[in-house]
């Protein structure tokens, strides 16, 4: 198997995205694990490098700017950059919200997704966007999962979020919905699709025979019908159906206890808070957010654009590095 090529879309030009993208691409663990190419305007990258004091090989930043990914070369220590000119974003005041940076960040992640769809890269990692700037640009944006769904012509209802940190992976059947709406969305077909998406994503990430644990919806997974019948009538039948297709799924388990289970490659939860509370307590700023269920492998980081520290060189790139390293495990070819 060859080395994965990971495109890094550098995110909001006025935030910490370019800084943590640079730090991730220069990280020795990343360079040993995969080939990266930054998707950005090289002038934006150079500006952040100067402001943050980021260098390569102990000298000024050395970039190889290419017009197409086929021209990238990883035979030396230069950083490859896919040139995506964003003239309105070059001189923006760092740490500000504005339409130009919103347009630029969407253009960059869109270009990276198209490269993955075309098979030019094996996976995409996106640095943080700023949703206010995107709104100022008049662009509809409700998070990366829905964006990637639209860009890949995938039904948004079949696209899911997988939060990853350490050995833990948590997949959400529903996300940014009211609790009432989310409960209405929990059908046997929905639960089957999210389990299948988790299984497929794990295999693409190199897990040969994934084991998946599935939560219930109600307290104590319904306690045999005492606290609700969704587990009996919806979730267990869905688990049995995918198991009959060869997927190693088990449950339903109580969402308050199942994360202690060992030997599980991914946990599927029904509601946003069932997964996010656990992730944010355990992972803090080191979680990678994978969008699964589309034809491409896509990850972003589970924190914001941090305008208050943009250009200061102090942004923590841990989550970005972790996201790229996870994508480095993508099956190639």
Image (cartoon, rainbow, N blue to C red):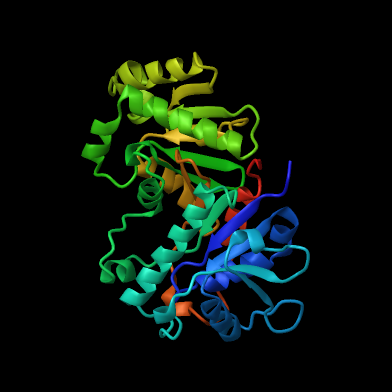
**As rendered, which of 228 and 198 lies closer to the eye?**
198
Considering every residue shown, the one lying at the far left of the view is 180
Residue 71 location, x and y as percent?
65, 63
Residue 203 location, x and y as percent?
60, 33
Report whether residue 283 is seen: no
Q: Is residue 85 above or below residue 72?
A: below
Considering every residue shown, the one lying at the far top of the view is 244
Residue 280 location, x and y as percent?
46, 52
Which image quarter: residue 69?
A: bottom right
**As rendered, which of 27 and 297 lies closer to the eye?**
297
| Number of marks present in the image shown | 0
In what quadrant of the picture does the C terminus appear?
A: top right
Specify whether 177 is left or right of 95.
left
Q: Is residue 154 above or below residue 10?
A: above
Which image quarter: residue 193?
A: top left
In what quadrant of the picture does the N terminus appear?
A: top right
**As rendered, which of 183 and 283 lies closer to the eye?**
183
The residue sitting at 44% across, 82% down in the picture is: 94
Specify whether 286 is left or right of 146.
right
Q: Is residue 160 above or below residue 15?
A: above
Which image quarter: residue 263?
A: top right
**As rendered, which of 174 and 41 lies closer to the eye?**
41
The residue sitting at 57% across, 67% down in the picture is: 67
Specify whether 220 is left or right of 84.
left
Residue 301 location, x and y as percent?
50, 58
Report whether residue 299 is seen: yes
The residue sitting at 38% across, 27% down in the picture is: 191
The residue sitting at 34% across, 24% down in the picture is: 189
């Amino acid at each position: 198997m060859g080395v994965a090529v990971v495109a890094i879309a550098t995110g909001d030009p006025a935030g910490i995205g370019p800084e943590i993208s640079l730090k991730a691409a220069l990280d020795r663990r990343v360079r040993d694990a995969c080939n990266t190419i930054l998707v950005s305007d090289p002038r934006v990258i150079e500006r952040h490098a100067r402001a943050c004091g980021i260098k390569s090989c102990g000298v000024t930043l050395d970039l190889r700017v290419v017009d197409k990914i086929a021209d990238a070369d990883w035979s030396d220590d230069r950083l490859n950059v896919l040139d995506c000119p964003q003239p309105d974003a070059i001189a923006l005041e760092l740490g500000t919200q504005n339409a130009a940076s919103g347009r630029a960040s969407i253009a960059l992640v869109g270009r990276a997704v198209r490269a993955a769809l075309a098979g030019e890269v094996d996976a995409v990692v996106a640095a943080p966007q700023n949703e206010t700037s995107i709104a100022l640009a008049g662009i509809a944006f409700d998070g990366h999962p829905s964006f990637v769904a639209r860009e890949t012509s995938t039904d948004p209802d079949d696209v899911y979020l997988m939060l990853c940190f350490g050995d833990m992976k948590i997949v959400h059947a529903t996300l940014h919905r009211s609790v009432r709406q989310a409960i209405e969305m929990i059908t046997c077909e929905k639960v089957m699709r999210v389990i299948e998406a988790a299984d497929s994503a794990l295999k693409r990430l190199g897990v040969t025979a994934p084991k998946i644990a599935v939560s219930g919806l109600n307290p104590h997974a319904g306690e045999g019908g005492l606290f609700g019948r969704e587990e009996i009538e919806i979730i267990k039948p869905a688990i049995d159906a995918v198991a009959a297709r060869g997927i190693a799924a088990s449950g339903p388990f109580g969402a308050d206890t199942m994360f202690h289970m060992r030997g599980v490659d991914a946990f599927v939860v029904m509601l946003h808070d069932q997964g996010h509370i656990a992730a944010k307590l355990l992972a803090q700023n080191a979680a990678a957010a994978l969008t699964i269920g589309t034809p491409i492998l896509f990850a972003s980081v589970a924190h914001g654009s941090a305008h208050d520290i943009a250009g200061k060189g102090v942004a923590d790139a841990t989550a970005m590095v972790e996201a790229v390293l996870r994508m480095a495990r993508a099956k190639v070819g």
